[in-house]
Image: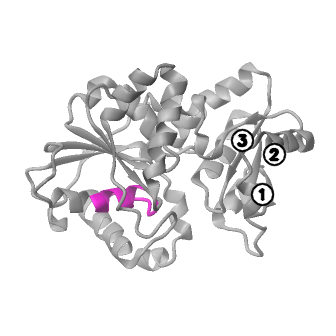
Amino acid sequence: MKARIDRMNLTSFGVDPKYDVRLLRLDQLHPEAQGNKWFKLKYNLEKARKDGRDTLLSFGGAWSNHLHALALTGKKEGFKTIGIVRGEEPKLWSDTLLDCKAAGMDLHFISRAEYKEKDENFFKQYLRDRFGSFHLIPEGGSNFHGVNGTLEIVGRDLAQEYKVIACPVGTGATLAGIALSSGSTPVLGFPALAQGAYLRGEIEQQLLYFLFDEESVAEVMENLHLHLDGHCGGFAKVNEELLQFQQKFREENGVELDFLYTAKMMMALCKELQKEDWAFGRKILCIHTGGLQGNRGVKGYQQLQD
């Protein structure tokens, strides 16, 4: 699959037209696993088939793009799917969970305290005792197989055409893959959650799975930078400024951004490009990581559409 690249008009956001900002349209690639989700699922599905497992189990919240992609892709590819959902079961299910259920996903709700233990060995054993044999995919698809897929998002040849690559960050798997595959081109990550500095450690660990050499990891990390101030108050937080930015961006460019990741990145990038100390050069490739289905859960979004 090859994604389209569109040039963005950012002058109405105060960005000098000398900057050539392009958007890699991963949101247009896959009908079920939109954006970066297919890349993170691709080799997980391959591994499950190789191991003879017909069930996929993963984790996420009530509006999880990952669970949504897993449910729809699993159905299409002939897998049973199990979703472990963060938080007690609500009286009214989100549109995302309703889609997952309609696609055949078996949904199970656990408390937030239990959810924090999801990566512990005893909890994984509990899941296997309860559900039997399955291929486990971490939240967001952030395992070896997930990062292996994200290596295919931006190849070295494409990366060399740009001075910097900008990407939203959730778990860090996509950023790790892009940093690993982009050669010497700097990669700028925009975490969608507050206090995201810890993500450097997460990304380093994921890179170590591939390189098995701390010096090689350090070399990749030298080209990776995190912009920590574009989260709009924290993960899944949306303010009026972001609502208005997303609407205006759609009107100016004909492109819809998801609020939780790509819109935050683009708004933060526009602010950065107005600063005199921007040091990454004029030609910039931004990654649209999809996730548009999650916009349905954002308060005030529907009013902007009407």
Does residue 120 belong to the magenta stretch? no
Horizontally, is 170 left or right of 167 in the view? right
Q: Which mark is residue 75?
A: 3
Read off the magenta span.
255-268
| Residue type for callout 1 | Glu
Element at label 2: helix
Does residue 261 belong to the magenta stretch? yes
| Callouts 1 and 2 close, C-beta under 8 Å | yes
Position of residue 76 relative to residue 234, above or below, is: above
Viewer-proximal residue among 44 and 97: 44
Viewer-proximal residue among 268 and 90: 268
Horizontally, is 257 left or right of 185 in the view? right
Which residue in the protein does label 2 denote? 123
Which residue in the protein does label 1 denote? 114
Q: Is residue 38 visible?
A: yes
The crowd level at tag 2 (other Cα within 10 Å; few <14, some 14-19, many 20+) is: some
